[in-house]
Structure formats: C-alpha cells, structure tokens
Image (cartoon, grey):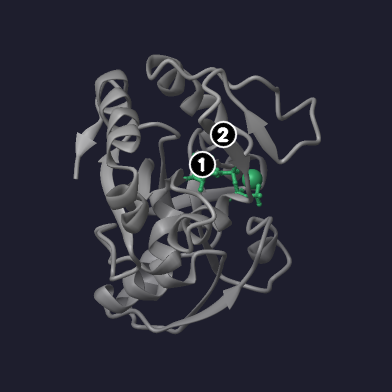
Amino acid sequence: MITLALSKGRIFDETLPLLAAAGIEVLEDPEKSRKLILPTSQPEVRVVLVRATDVPTYVEYGGADLGVTGKDVLIEHGANQDGSPRGTGLYQPLDLQIAKCHMAVAAPAGFDYARAVRQGSRITVATKYTAIAREFFADKGVHVDLIKLYGSMELAPLTGMADAIVDLVSTGKTLKANNLVEVEHIMGISAQLVVNQAALKLKTAPIRRIIDAFAAAAPQAEKL
Ligand code: ATP
Ligand code: MG
C-alpha cells in the first residue's frame, strides 16, 4: 500500500491533476465525505487527509509514504531557509510549482515600516511563521518581538497588538480588505513533494512511478 498525505483545499485541488497524470483518481470528494482515508482507482494507493501543517509529520514518521506540502510548512517544520531538509528523514525530490504564493511583511498603511527599520527601532510582528520571520529579521538586523498566532494575522495590527505581520499573500485581497500594505517580499512559496526515505527504499518502484509522473505532469516542476 502507498499512502499519500494531502491537506484539503488548494493543495488537494492542485494535486488532483498530477495524480490523474499518474493514472490515479481519488474516488471520494473530501468536501462531501467525512472520511479521512480516501480510496483511489488504484487499490494499492490511498490518500490521507491531514491538516496542512501535519503533512511533514505524517511523512517523517511513516504515517504516509509521501505528501504534498507548502514550502512555508516545510521550513517551519524544520528545514533550512532554502527549503532543503535538515535531517528530518524527508526526501524532497520535486518543487511542484503549485499552490503558489509568497511570504510577505505587511503593515497598516499608517505605519512607517521603512523608518522603523532605518532607525533600528524594535518592532512587534505577529505571525504563524515564527521560524521564517525570526530568520528574515535577524538577517536584516532588525530587532523584532514575535507574537505567535495560529490564524487571522491581519487582526493583530488592527487591534494594536502588533506593528506588522508576516503572512502568506497570493492575491493581496485579504491585506487590502484589512487596510494593510505589503512592505517586504520575503520569499516565493510553492508546494513540494516530500517522501519518507525509508519508504522509498522499501517501495522504490511504485513510489518512483509517482514521482516521475508528477515530474512529467507538473509543467514547471523543478527537480530539487
Ligand atoms: P488551515 O486552513 O488548516 O489552518 P492552512 O491555512 O495552512 O491550514 P491552507 O489555507 O489550505 O492551509 O494552505 C495550504 C498551503 O497552501 C499553505 O501552506 C501554502 O503553502 C499554500 N497557499 C497558497 N496560497 C495561499 C494563501 N493565499 N494563503 C494561505 N496559504 C496559501
Ligand atoms: Mg487556511
């Protein structure tokens, strides 16, 4: 049995065409079914639905043989800033170039971020992505107090809890709706294929088939 970990939403939706290219059709719609294990048209392949941030954990500990997860999630899980693994037993063969967005610093239109940075002021930044934020501001030499949040980062500056946020941006609509402006582009984010290294050794042929089919089907996939 080959188990693929996916999260509902854009990762699931954008992985479906890649699975189709590998001849794998998911037989249930996760938006309609309450099942967490979804059978596929290949009896030897199943999909498990997990929280986006749990995908690397499932793959690392062998709950899944492979998974698709954002570079943001991987870095926060314990990879280097370039996304390469830091001894987590995760093999990352492909950047699938799907679920694309970027990590950014955003602040209220009235906050003079450039001046705060220039003057070396301490700034308070709310984010779910504390590893990325810590390294980004450390590299810039900016003194930062980080506040860890788990959702709706946009609210933090609006309530006066933080000066700025570090969050994922795709269209920028959420920032705009909350009177925030992007003040720094931190890094591009896309979804990566991650594979459990032990599983790859034990089930080389079926896992390789999936990796190769994904590489062929993801038009701009980059071999890592
Ligand atoms: P949850 O919704 O369970 O709290 P999540 O918000 O991390 O988790 P999704 O919103 O499904 O999960 O995002 C999954 C991945 O999709 C992210 O980790 C990121 O790599 C990618 N992504 C692409 N665009 C965006 C965006 N605009 N906002 C958030 N994530 C995005
Ligand atoms: Mg979400």
Q: Is residue 56 above or below residue 132?
A: above
Label located before the other in sequence (2 or 1):
1
Instruction: Residue type at mark 2: give it.
Output: Arg
Q: Residues within 10 Å of mark 1 (few under 14, many from 20)?
A: many
Q: Are marks 2 and 1 in contact (CB under 8 Å)?
A: yes
Q: Which residue: 66% across, 40% down?
A: 177
Q: Ligand 2 appears in which quadrant?
A: top right
| Residue 205 in which image quadrant | top left
Which x, y percent locates residue 211? Answer: 30, 33
Whether residue 108 appears in this view of the structure is no
Which x, y percent locates residue 183? Answer: 41, 54
Identify the residue position indicated by label 1 in the image: 3
Which x, y percent locates residue 54? Answer: 57, 57
Residue 83: image tag: none
Instruction: Residue type at mark 1: give it.
Output: Thr
| Residue 97 in which image quadrant | top left
Identify the residue position indicated by label 2 in the image: 46
Q: Which residue: 29% across, 54% down?
A: 91
The reply, left or right, for residue 161 in relation to residue 180 is right
Front in this rendered view, residue 133 or 208: 208
Report if the beta carbon of the residue with label 1 is closer than 8 angstroms to ligand 1. Answer: no
Q: Quadrant of the C terminus?
A: top left
Q: Is residue 31 above or below residue 136?
A: above
